[in-house]
Image (cartoon, rainbow, N blue to C red):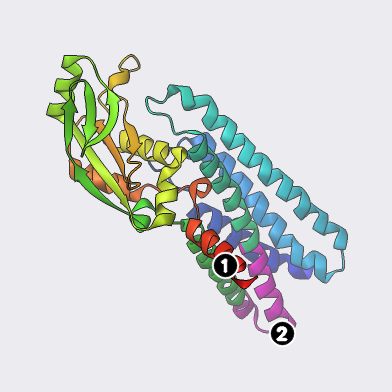
Amino acid sequence: MEQYFILIITALVMGTIARLLMMKVDYRQYPTYPQSYLGHFTLGMIAAGLGAVTVPALAEKEYTAITFITLAAQHFRDVRNMERESLDNIEVTELVPRGTAYIEDIAKGFEARNYLALLTSLASGIGYFIGQHFELPMVVRILVGVAFGSIVIVIITQMLKGVSIEDIAEVKPAEISFDGPLLTINGVFVMNIGLKDSQKIFLEKGIAVEIIPKDEDAMSVLANVGQRQAIQHNASTQLGIRKDVDEPDFTPIARRNPENGNVVMAIITMNPDVDCLVEVVKRTPVLESSKRRALDVAFKSKSEKMGR
């Protein structure tokens, strides 16, 4: 295996770099602290190492080494469970919870990023091995391995980007009003607020948006409660929310207009800026669990019936 030393190092470095590129701190708070960075960096190196030794193992006909990849897949699923449990444990500390759908989406993201490290190192190892097979100079072999790994990084990173609310819907500022104690946004009932002081605060400092789906598929996505909870959480986290644990009146609620599928939401932030709210809602990711292809299913079913 000594002749594969440079191959393993090249693949290990590329896989680790792939994992590092996906590690960033953002408003979703994962990972945020040094302990999390160290843990995920180590897991990324382990995943990259498994991918790096796969090619030499196959070249030497050590097929039993492939079983380690199976163990890695199980370990990465455990990573998803670990992240889910961690976020579930701190959910009670959030003024506006993420919701189980958002948490599951985050946990899946962690699992997928370890697969990215493994596949990148595997591709880099294959590239180096091809160069070695054709007896290319060592520098060229390394460059071929780096090129293969880079291609995988670009492809998988694009796949993991997903879509956001602005891709499926139009977001516009909306008007808050009261019909007696009923808080309404652009004519859509949201909730009952009986306290006059709370009503006054909403009218003076409240901002609201209306989310208009672009098609029936988008309408199905916005109908998902988990998706709306993610929007509420993102808005409160990024803009700051004017509420405490004992002020339920100021909890943002996204309501759906049953007549047209539009979603409205009001929130009282520390610095009211409706343009910022519009931008935050636009950038909210569309959760995997909320994605629907209602039109495709309907058309397929209709076509099958017509073909009979």
- Where is mark 2, residue-wise? 135
User: Residue placed at 65% from the left, 74% from the top?
Assistant: 127
Where does the C terminus fall, quadrant-wise?
bottom right
Contact between marks 2 and 1 (CB within 8 A): the answer is no
Q: Is residue 189 above or below residue 16?
A: above
Magenta span has 137? yes
Q: Nearer the viewer, residue 47 or 93?
A: 93
Q: Who's the residue at 40% across and 53% down the image?
A: 218
**Mark 2 is on which residue type?**
Glu
Q: Is residue 222 magenta?
A: no
Q: Which residue is mark 1?
A: 152
The residue sitting at 71% across, 75% down in the picture is: 129
Quarter holding residue 215: bottom left
Judge from the rendering whether residue 199 lies leftward or rightward of residue 18; answer left or right.
left
In magenta, the rendered stretch is: 120-141
Element type at marker 2? Answer: loop
Residue 1, located in which quarter of the rendered image? bottom right
Q: Which residue does the image show at 37% across and 56% down from the upper left?
A: 168
Seen from the viewer's position, the closer of residues 8 and 190 is 190
Relative to 106, is 149 above or below?
Answer: below
